[in-house]
Image: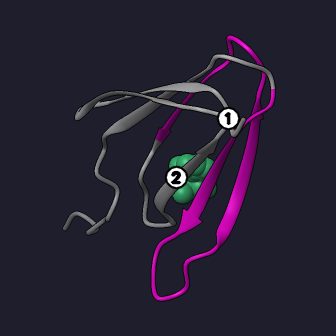
Amino acid sequence: MEKKSTTSGEYVVIKAIDDGVNVIGLTRGTDTRFHHSEKLDKGEVMIAQFTEHTSAIKIRGNAKIFTSYGEVESEAKK
Ligand code: TRP
């Protein structure tokens, strides 16, 4: 039998517009905390999924985010 998984299979694409974009993975479950932080420089792309370990993704800095819901831009604090 196939293992039940919370991985949706969907991908989120994050493209850094400036240096120093942070992609932070937050844990799934009763305890919501950072478990991974990835630094992207200008032009770098990260392709990520929601998994049994990752329920949310926080993005800091200027980036374009492409999801099946559409495209959004994160902005750095001025
Ligand atoms: N080990 C993590 C996981 O399987 C890797 C990961 C997946 C991740 N999606 C992410 C890390 C999004 C940061 C952001 O869940």
Instruction: Check the picture and name the quadrant holding the C terminus.
Output: top right
Mark 2 residue CB less than 8 A from any atom of ligand 1: yes
| Residue 18 in which image quadrant | top right
Instruction: Determine whether the residue tagged by mark 2 lies in a helix, strand or loop.
Output: strand
Instruction: Determine whether the residue tagged by mark 1 lies in a helix, strand or loop.
Output: loop
The percent coordinates of residue 40 (x first, y second) are 74, 28
Q: Is residue 56 above or below residue 12?
A: below
Q: Nearer the viewer, residue 31 or 17?
A: 17
Contact between labelled residues 2 and 1, with CB atoms less than 8 Å apart: no
Q: Nearer the viewer, residue 39 or 61?
A: 61
Q: Is residue 11 above or below residue 19?
A: below
What's the residue type where badge 1 is placed?
Ala
Instruction: Check the picture and name the quadrant holding the N terminus.
Output: bottom left
Residue occupying the far left of the picture: 1
**Residue 46 magenta-drawn?**
yes
Crowding near pointer 1: few (<14 within 10 Å), some, many (20+)? Answer: few
In the rendered image, which residue does mark 2 sit on?
57
- Relative to 76, 70 lies left or right: left
Q: Which residue does the image show at 55% across and 78% down from the upper left?
A: 32
In the rendered image, which residue does mark 1 sit on?
76
Mark 1–mark 2 Cα distance, whole angstroms, equals 16 Å
Magenta region, mostly helix, strand or loop? strand
**Residue 35 magenta-drawn?**
yes
What range is drawn magenta here?
Answer: 20-48
